[in-house]
């Protein structure tokens, strides 16, 4: 799994959406292992969210709720935003890409499947690509569904 952990800084703030299905192993563990202390985890599954807590810093925040509502309603910004929704929710996530970018100060990381990328005419094997008008890189994370990828968008002072 090629999560962009090298882009994380200990003093980053982070929002981790759709994080509980696998106990945070897809995304939250990388934030923890990078030493981030100010992380908010959001998932609709309160039972799985609560099961994660013992494995993460006590300074982290936990919110049971609809991640889409958080995206749609928030005006807060975090240094890092991660989104690892189920593949059947990818269209809903990608339709909010600009909103997610507005919530992100430095790095946006979004999971997406190869079938979705193919439907959009995107070849993730290229070094970088354009996605919804933004320059992004793709990192393969698994072979599930013919390949799943992290879309990685690093903001610059011009973004």
Image (tube, helix red, strand yellow):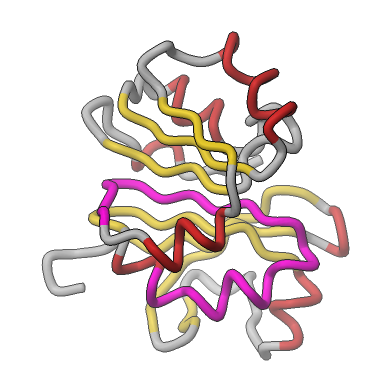
Left or right relative to 45: residue 37 = left
Residue 17 included in the magenta stretch of the image:
no
146 or 56, which lies in front? 56
Q: What residue lies at 58% left-to-right and 46% top-to-bottom? A: 65
Residue occupying image coordinates x 44% and y 13%: 57
The span shown in magenta is 76-99
Is 60 placed left or right of 95 in the picture?
Answer: left
Q: Please tell me whether residue 55 is drawn above or below residue 103 in the rendered image.
A: above
Image: 158 above or below 105: below
State left or right for residue 22 relative to residue 149: right
Indicate the position of residue 106 as horizontal and vertical percent values: 26, 54
Q: What residue sits 47% from the left and 44% below the top?
A: 4
Q: In this view, does 60 lie to the left or right of 79?
A: right
Residue reaching furthest right? 145
Tell me which residue sits at (75%, 38%) in the image.
Answer: 21
Residue 91 vs 143, above or below: the answer is below
Q: Is 97 colored magenta in this rendering?
A: yes
In the displayed orientation, state which residue is furthest to the left.
Answer: 157
Q: Choose between 18 and 10: the one closer to the eye.
A: 18
User: Residue 136: percent from the left, percent from the top?
Assistant: 44, 71
- Please state the horizontal and vertical placement of residue 3, each as a whole percent of the image: 54, 43
The quarter of the picture where the C terminus appears is bottom left
Q: In which quarter of the image is the N terminus?
A: top right
Q: Quadrant of residue 72?
A: bottom left
In this figure, what is the number of numbered marks? 0
Q: Does 92 appear above or below 107?
A: below
Residue 60 spot, x, y in % from top left: 41, 23
């Amino acid at each position: 799994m090629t999560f962009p952990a090298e882009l994380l800084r200990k003093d980053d703030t982070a929002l981790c959406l759709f994080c509980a299905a696998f106990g945070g192993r897809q995304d939250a563990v990388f934030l923890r292992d990078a030493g981030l202390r100010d992380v908010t985890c959001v998932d609709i599954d309160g039972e799985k969210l609560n099961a994660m807590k013992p494995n993460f810093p006590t300074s982290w925040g936990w919110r049971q709720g609809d991640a889409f509502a958080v995206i749609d309603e928030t005006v807060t910004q975090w240094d890092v935003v991660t989104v690892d929704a189920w593949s059947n929710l990818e269209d809903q996530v990608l339709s909010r890409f600009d909103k997610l970018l507005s919530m992100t100060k430095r790095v946006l990381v979004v999971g997406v499947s190869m079938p979705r990328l193919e439907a959009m005419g995107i070849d993730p094997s290229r070094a970088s690509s354009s996605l919804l008008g933004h320059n992004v890189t793709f990192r393969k994370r698994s072979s599930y569904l013919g390949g799943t990828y992290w879309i990685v968008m690093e903001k610059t002072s011009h973004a």
